[in-house]
Image (cartoon, rainbow, N blue to C red):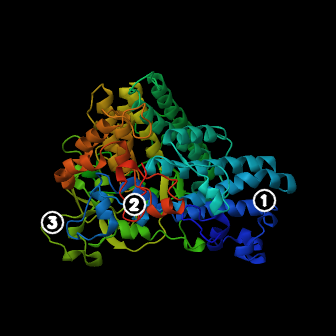
Amino acid sequence: MKRITYFTHVMLLGLAGLGMTSCTDFLTLYPLDKVVEENFWEDKNDLEGVRYGAYMQMAGTIEKFIAWGDARSDAYEYHTINPDNSDYREIMLANPDSTMGIYDWGAVYTTINYCNKVLSHGDEILENDPQFTPTEWQQMKAEVTALRALNYFYLIRAFKDVPFTFDVINSDEDVRTFKNTLQMDILNTLIDDVKSVAGMGKSRFPKDADTKGLMTNTAIYALLAEMHLWRSALREGRLAVVSGEPVYTQEDVLADARSVIEYGQKALDALALQNQQITNSSYDRNTSKKDKYGSGLENADLIKNEDMDGDYQQNSRSIEVNSFDDIFVRGNSEESMFEIQFSSSDRRNSGFMRSLWGFKTDKRFLLAVSNMAVDNALKNLPAGAVDCRRWYICADGRYLNSEGIRNLDDNSKFYYCTKWLDCTFDRASLNGTMVTDVMSDISVTSYRNWIIYRMTDVMLMMAEAHAVLGNYAQCRSIVDAIQKRSTLDQTTGLSKSTDNNKDACIKLVMNERLVELLGEGKRWFDLVRYAERIGGGTNPDPREPQFFNGADGVSQMVEDYLAKGAYSKLKSNMKSRMQNRYGLYSPIYYRERSANYYEIPQNPVWNREKGDNNNQSGS
């Protein structure tokens, strides 16, 4: 393999750096460049080794997932104090480029290839290893099928149309046979594939880190709920056709919305069962007091924040935010459905979070607080309401003396997300309705888990689906429940919204997702889905000419969410740069295209490449 591509990162070579004890026989008996692979697949330990390797490989791609899913969104401002702040600044200014290494997707395809390896060899190991039972294989097959789908789901949300295969990749020649597959075709296949194994995974594993760090039934159902949410949006934005008969109907859109609610509820039910099993096991779990907060959903019991029911004004003028500590600091909480584990014992660290959100002037992400709200009131809340999420997700850099932040202009506010940093979160001291000295210490951590699915994320997926279905009261009820958990006076109605129309309720959900899921790598994907649902335009889609190109959705999304705060002066530039739905997606890394002899076409909006000397940009 003299000319190995960046796309493949062939599985056998990639295993060398994973350090999996179950693969010791494979790594020690054969030179890596002369491996006879069929001598490796002998028993279930080999299968489990590659399965664990897929998760370890995926852990190395999280920074890319964050950049693809968050960096261009209204949650952040570009650095005005450091104009040369790497590629991230240009991405935030709607100037992504195909030479930026952040768009190299090779590592994600490596994870997928590990999954393909496991799925292709499972049956033969079941036949050859008497210690490997059909039930074990069925559970592993469900888990790995969902993990593969999740990684492809990241790719189609980030790049739209991508190379797609369930076949194992062993050489360059295997890769060169690939052609791009349309996003919708991939999504349809993924939904069907995961549905075929839904409910067949494990409810939990013996260890907490595996229960929350591997794809259990609750994670599989959460993935299905989100994929249906996306398909409902893609179909809705393509109801109108340029000519001919409609391809999708309103019933298609509604059917997907109903599936979001169905699988979302199954995810909540599976999580409740999982937590009950953990509580009754020998493994120590925090068992925080929980409350439904009136959501109307079964098994939507949120971790309760103490002292937030109004008594704070009479007792100690201090409040304890249990949910933050359980979900983000300790990790693997009762609300967690799937999170990537980082630990020193596995030689996996999450230090990249410091480079994205740390407290220095050269860090990538500054929070666009003006797009959320001012002071302690966040979006959707009535005047005077105090939301504790404002304290623990967002720190004002002027008042922190960590890592040289005092060098900033004291008259300017620079806000940073603290979810993924090692912060000592004390009880919040109250001065009227304002909060001071929330963070008593900020230090360095490299082992904070990265959460992919958790309870409130799924609840808000269901709320959006209810908005699509016209169940507006149910949509508002879910949003209110999530807000109420974090609001001081929990007897007060929160959103105060009585709008009985879809657009208002979807915006209610979008505003809540901005605050609740801030800094969790989801906001840009949410904005893409919002724009795709609107769709429209006057010109045909470059690759699917039966549909319009989605230009109306892009324009409306920019008006509703990006034409504010630091981005307000860039509104016209963003509209002209993004043009149509393809502008919502990322450019294809130029080395991926050259390695495949330009068989992978470039995203037609970003079709000018610095690295393309042959001018074979493709469209």
- Give me the residue at 20% from left, 69% from top: 81
**Which one is in front, 602 or 134?**
602
Tell me which label, 2 or 1, sits earlier in the chain. 1
Residue 494 appears in which quarter of the rendering? top left
Is residue 427 left or right of 48 when viewed as pictured?
left
Residue 359 appears in which quarter of the rendering? bottom left
- Give me the residue at 22% from left, 64% from top: 414
Specify the label residue 98 is tagged with. 2
Specify the label residue 221 is tagged with. none
Q: Above or below — where is 401 with respect to 571?
A: below
Residue sitting farthest toward the left? 411
Q: Position of residue 216 (x, y in %)?
A: 62, 49
Q: Position of residue 444 (x, y in %)?
A: 40, 74
**Would residue 379 be visible to someone looking at this image?**
no
Residue 242 appears in which quarter of the rendering? top left
Is residue 606 left or right of 78 when viewed as pictured?
right
**Would residue 111 be visible to someone looking at this image?**
yes
Q: CA distance from mark 1 to mark 3?
A: 58 Å
Q: Which kind of residue does numbered mark 2 sit on?
A: Ser
For label 3, the residue is 412
**Which one is in front, 116 or 243?**
243
Q: Position of residue 556 (x, y in %)?
A: 26, 38
Secondary element under disc 2, as helix, strand or loop, is loop
Q: Which kind of residue does numbered mark 1 sit on?
A: Lys
Tell me which label, 3 or 2, sits earlier in the chain. 2
The nearer-to-camera label among 2 and 1 is 2
Q: Which kind of residue does numbered mark 3 sit on?
A: Ser
For label 1, the residue is 44
